[in-house]
Amino acid sequence: MPLPRSLARANRVGLNRAVVHVAGRLPGFALMHHRGRRSGRSYTTPVNAFRIGNGYRFALTYGSNSDWARNVVAAGECDITVRGRTVHLTDPRLEKDRSARWAPGPVGMVLRRIGADTYLQCRIGEDR
């Protein structure tokens, strides 16, 4: 089972506010820029991101019901800041892989351990 929602709420209030200042530059992390599906409000969320082929894959450590993941799927696009540059992404889709072999060794081990078998896959779109 992915990490509990109560931990996600605590992270949103505490840890995310600190991590947002560095996540767009650290390996394995990105800043996800997305719009609320009901409010239309702009959000920036630190996420685990990995370049896979012609896109990026995002670990859903809190499961596929995470607001940011639902917002991206509903919008059909998003932007991320990764290693200091902004990348436009399209075609978001939720996929499952219990093995997490796509993730670097230690990350894959953690994902398997917590049962986070769903990830978000996006394709790199054309710059806007």
Image (tube, grey):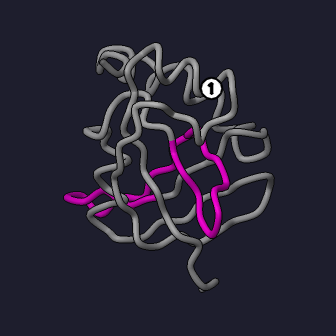
Residue 57: give x, y in percent of width and height.
Answer: 54, 51
User: What's drawn in magenta, residue-wise?
Assistant: 34-58
Give yes or no for residue 36 being in the magenta stretch. Answer: yes
Position of 29 relative to 37 (above/below): above
Q: Nearer the viewer, residue 83 or 15?
A: 83
Q: Residues within 10 Å of mark 1 (few under 14, many from 20)?
A: some
Q: Main secondary structure of the magenta part?
A: strand
Q: Residue at x 56, y 21 (%)?
A: 15
Q: Which residue is mark 1?
A: 107
Is 55 part of what is drawn in magenta?
yes
Assign the N terminus to one quadrant of the image.
Answer: top left
Residue 51, picture quadrant? bottom right
Quadrant assignment, res 116: top left
* Amino acid at the residue labelled 1: Val
Q: Residue 29: x, y in percent?
A: 67, 40
Report the residue at 44% width, 59% height from top: 34
| Disc 1 element | helix
91 left or right of 89 in image: left
Question: How many discs appear?
Answer: 1
The reply, left or right, for residue 102 in relation to residue 86 is left
116 lies left or right of 124: left
Q: Residue at x 65, y 27 (%)?
A: 18
